[in-house]
Image: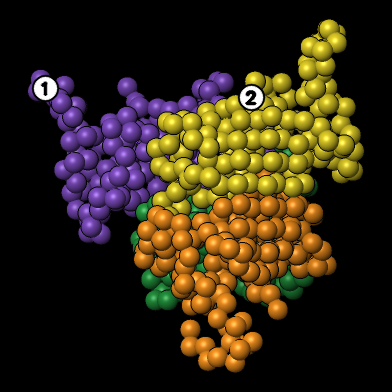
Chain colours: A yellow, B purple, C orange, D green
């Protein structure tokens, strides 16, 4: 099952069209990914302090239904690995009717001390549990 | 007792100093006031649609302790009326230790169809309950 | 030649990684499109007042080089029509060395009084000049 | 004469009331202060890297006239010292008619390696020129 967080639109996130400004969906997606990390006991700020920066290399967002003042929504996070990249599939659903709001793919890479490279720490955090389910290994993450 | 909401810092709200950018506290305060309205079954967006705009005339904020990545905080709302103005006393407290983060006074006025004036609707919403407590009147707001 | 605007990074646009937060590039792209409209004497806000809303249906952004505090950058706008969509090709270049920062494709559609449809007004604004160059027609836009 | 910068409202800065959201004025004021530093060859980000953080202790803003889509405005910066504080008087004027938009007082203090203290570097940058004008000293800042 996907990780997800539920948030409510804040009025300042709406623009003069009276709907959530598009850039704010990118904020929601980012916050959901960071909360996903938190759920694994990893802090994005702490990673940065230790020289590990997860950065977005590419984002693809399809805007299906606008959110507006008063709306509550659910933002999901699924992650898989493709080569050196972590690819996040993320959707936003309006809570009232479960209607799809945004469908996004976010490709991120890791910079360790400024250099692009594999990040064993994140690999273990994201995928060890999954592997241990398959291989029956203990998982003290 | 004060109305309050509890929120968590989102990493994109932090700036290059690694702490919440000051302007975001103004966002938090605004969101708390609008949630206060919601708690009274009033929608800020709906008021705007009906030609009633509550606007901030003056804000005074003292920044006591910075919030940072991972912090949860409580933002309070108290309102009183002074002449034509609604004066909101609002504080932000860090949840972990109840330390004062921001102490703010926000003076707002009402524009009805663009003209400054008293707003009976908001008066009743904000203060009727209070009065009925004093005068023992029923309060079907 | 592409339409473009030149802007400078504002420090509050940088996040705790010390670089411009990704969502802000979406802001830059939007602002450049709206300035492109302005250069054609069209106001996005005025369109909205008249019931014409240009909305983003899909955005694809590749992040190549981060901008940081003090950087100046150029944001370009090119538009073509594909079916009912206006497709904007937009790039962001760092001014100091013309390095590619962001490469984006932004697909927008028009809602007229809330319904998806062709917008003759924008067609003429975006493409008449081009056609008149080809066909030698006068262009009093 | 005051230092000032001229900016144009970006549509995403407007909220569902169709006017610039109040928190954005705080962004404008901050950006003007940082550009004021730049004009003295000082970078806010560089100060932070060297352990010097100028932080806002108190802000007082009076909102006089709202800015809206399409508006250009001028944001001024004047600074004086009061005890350990730098007190900035900042105004925002609409360019079209020089009408006062926001009148602000921003009190900042310096943290050097996290501790509140005098900052000789900023003192010299802000006030040496002034003193040399009074006392006829050379001013190679």
Q: Chain of mark 1?
A: B
Q: Which residue, given by chain and number where applicable, does mark 2 sit on?
A: A3
Percent across and percent down for residue B68 are 63, 34
Q: Are marks 1 and 2 on the same chain?
A: no
Image vertical order of residue C48 relative to residue A116, above or below: below
Q: Which residue, given by chain and number where applicable, does mark 1 sit on?
A: B138
Give the crowd class for mark 2: few <14, some 14-19, many >=20 residues within 10 Å: some
Q: Which quadrant does the C terminus of chain B fall into?
A: top left
- Of helix, strand and loop, which one carries label 2? strand
Image vertical order of residue B40 relative to residue D88, above or below: above
Image vertical order of residue C91 relative to residue D120, above or below: below
Q: Which quadrant does the N terminus of chain B fall into?
A: top left
Q: Chain of mark 2?
A: A
Residue under the image location 60 percent in, 83 percent down: C131
Residue under the image location 69 percent in, 75 percent down: C2
Name the side, left or right, on which D95 lies relative to A4: left
Q: Residue furthest front?
A: C83
Residue under the image location 37 percent in, 38 percent down: B34
Percent across and percent down for residue A129 are 78, 16
Q: Is residue C18 visible?
A: no
Image vertical order of residue A83 relative to residue A6, above or below: below
Percent across and percent down for residue B133 are 16, 21
Q: Is residue C27 visible?
A: yes
The reply to whether dot 1 and dot 2 touch (C-beta < 8 Å) is no
Percent across and percent down for residue D131 are 64, 68
Quarter occupied by residue C81: bottom right
Q: Nearer the viewer, residue B104 or A65?
A: A65
Question: Spatial distance from mark 1 to mark 2, Cα to Cα?
Answer: 46 Å
Closer mark to the observer between disc 1 and disc 2: 2
Residue under the image location 68 percent in, 52 percent down: C60
As drawn, the label of residue C61 is: none
Q: Nearer the viewer, residue D24 or A63?
A: A63
């Amino acid at each position: 099952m996907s990780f997800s967080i539920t948030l409510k639109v804040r009025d300042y996130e709406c623009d003069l069209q009276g709907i959530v400004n598009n850039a704010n969906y990118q904020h929601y997606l980012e916050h959901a990914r960071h909360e996903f990390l938190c759920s694994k006991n990893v802090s994005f700020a702490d990673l940065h302090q230790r020289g590990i920066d997860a950065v977005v290399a590419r984002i693809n967002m399809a805007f299906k239904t606008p959110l507006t003042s008063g709306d509550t929504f659910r933002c999901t996070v699924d992650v898989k690995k493709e080569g050196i990249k972590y690819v996040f599939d993320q959707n936003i659903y309006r809570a009232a009717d479960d209607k799809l709001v945004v469908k996004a793919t976010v490709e991120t890479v890791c910079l360790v001390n400024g250099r692009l490279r594999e990040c064993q720490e994140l690999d273990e955090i994201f995928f060890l549990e999954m592997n241990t389910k398959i291989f029956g290994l203990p998982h003290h993450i």
